[in-house]
Image (tube, grey):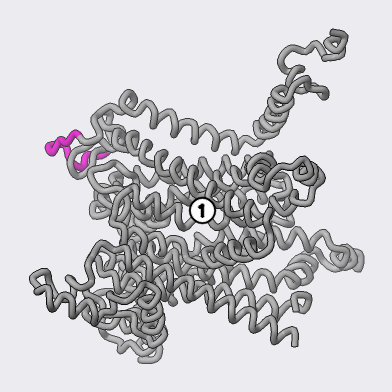
Amino acid sequence: MRTLKRGLGLIVTVAVTLLGLLLVTFLIGRVVPIDPVLSALGDRASAESYEQMRRALGLDLPLWQQFARYVGDVLHGDLGVSVLTSRPVLEDVLRVFPATLELATVAVIIGAVLGVPAGVFAATHRGGWPDHAIRLLGLIGHSVPIFWLGLMALLLFYARLDWVPGPGRFDVFYEGLVEPVTGVASIDALLAGEPDVFWNTLHHLILPSAILGLYSVAYIARMTRGFMLDQLRQEYITTARVKGLSEARVVWRHALGNIAVPLITVIALSYAGLLEGSVLTETVFAWPGLGLYITNSLLSADMNAVLGGTLVVGAVFIALNLLSDLLYRLLDPRAR
Amino acid sequence: MSARADSPPLGWRGWLTTDTPRSRAQARLGRAWAGWTGFRRNRLAVAGLLIVVALVVVAALAPLLAPYHPYAQDLGNRLQPPSAAHWLGTDAFGRDILSRLIFGARLTLMIVALVAATAPLAGLVIGTVAGYLGGWVDTVLMRITDIALAFPKLILALAFVAALGPGIENAVIAIAITSWPPYARIARAETLTVRRADFISAARLQGASSLRIILGHIMPLCVASLIVRTTLDMAGVILTAAGLGFLGLGAQPPLPEWGAMIASGRQYVLEQWWVAAMPGLAIFIVSLGFNLLGDGLRDVLDPKGD
């Protein structure tokens, strides 16, 4: 019964949050200094057809009714038509989203693989130089403009050292060779049985995902350190040491095992942050994902596309927040 | 007069560190001194403070420090590498990059100051009112805050600027609108810890209104943690503003905003790397300064942190 009540509460919270997000995008759409009637008809329209169009778009209704209509449209998957591509925004967003997902997924793996051990190391060397070094590195990581770091990395690793290929998802001669099935380039290449294309797209993925991943290393390391310090103070750790277990086993098995649950929620949260951070990274690396789609639409004042993209990123963001919350409750018996 | 005898005769330092301050001002200065001695021990934090002070000085004295006018074009000398005449090189219009960075410090400082003056204040008001009044006011305000916290900040700021039109003022508005919720949470948490304290009850029994208690007794107690959080957030504000500038949504050319300068150097990055590299270094140093300062302040003002 309690679980049911909590579950219901969670659903209400998510629904209210999503409604809030819709309200914000709706209001942003209202304050745009572009007259939607004129942009549909052109500025030579007669007063009569202007009025007709205004009514057809529902702009004569009171604001709350317009909002209700907007919510209804979004629930039916209608995010409007992009001026730039003249396709439904939802279709566009679904086409580009897998590229962002691919980038952010590899980035969060890099972040976790580097961040968790760094945090553990800092905690076991508390107050010593590794702790300070990792703290300082974290502060540095949070001070670098990510788009600038991307440009500098391209300059160094692509132009000067030639270790990685340039921007984009494939080399030019691999472009269009693989039929997009899932939209995730590396998986599509494997499905099509094209190992060359697979390696090529992996090479293209390394630099942008490393740059993006570095951003979450600092956060994951800091949280890991905090959780570990809490655990290392506990009595069961003393017991384990007294039993004669090796220090490595105490730290990596017992302590780390116990922070797995909060750690997973932290990683889920930083995954959400990375989806957002991909906007600037994708712009620098010409990565054809949602971020690049939003910025390209911004530059051509394509508000339907901008707001549709914002809505999708926001919804995924909220969903990941919720998922980390749910995971926490499912995996940690104390939180039930 | 006899009271004077038990004050330790140690000059101004003794006056500051005495256990028995004679006035409220002396007690406050003494506390500030104690904080400063703690802060001074943290070398990284002092480095951060120096960077922030340097930013303020450079911004204030920009016309005196800059060797050239920030808009002075010299097309014969475009894209020159760093040299004795142009320490950081010149950009695509032959403008001196160092001079533009120096004048750009004013824009960065302005953005930081405007956001720091608005978002934490809004959060402070919402958080203290919600925490002190409790009940349905608390529920409504915190539900709104939670909803706002769940939004992706950068993307919303992008959408706001897209709607309001590009420009530095709109970028500041967009950043401020998207960054108040954490402050409201902190202020509310602080308020809840003091709400039931005896001195608040005493003030209420003396007939002080809710407004007076919030303004006079609760808000001052929230300020310390808000200052820490604000300082740490300023690095993020600088990065967001630069990101908006980089995307062409913040300050517009020819304004020497650092993010926009990186954008204009982007097309030359593989050959004339300094055009994009120098403004990025400036952003990095300044936001590192705020991060180091905030980190040090957290240790001094908010020892609960770690």
Give the residue at mark 1.
Answer: A141
Can residue A98 be spotted in the picture?
no
- Callout 1 secondary element: helix
Residue type for callout 1: Gly
Where in the figure is residue A295, as x and y percent of width and height?
Answer: 31, 65
Q: Is residue B239 left or right of residue A127?
A: left
Residue B244, compared with residue A186, is above or below; it is above
Residue A247 sits in quarter: bottom right
Outermost residue to the top: B1
Where in the figure is residue B105, as x and y percent of width and height?
Answer: 38, 37
Where in the figure is residue A161, as x and y percent of width and height?
Answer: 35, 58
Residue B233, compared with residue A312, is above or below; it is above
Is residue B234 magenta-colored?
no
Q: Is residue B30 left or right of residue A208?
A: right
Chain of the residue under label 1: A
Residue A253 sits in quarter: bottom right
Q: Residue at x 39, y 49 (%)?
A: B172
Q: Quadrant of the C terminus of chain A?
A: bottom right
Q: Looking at the picture, tell me which residue is in the foreground, B239 or B164.
A: B164
Is residue B74 magenta-colored?
yes
Q: Residues within 10 Å of mark 1 (few under 14, many from 20)?
A: some
Q: Residue at x 67, y 50 (%)?
A: A131
- Part of the protein shown in magenta: B72-81
Would you say the magenta stretch is mainly helix, strand or loop?
loop
Where in the figure is residue B188, as x and y percent of width and height?
Answer: 65, 54
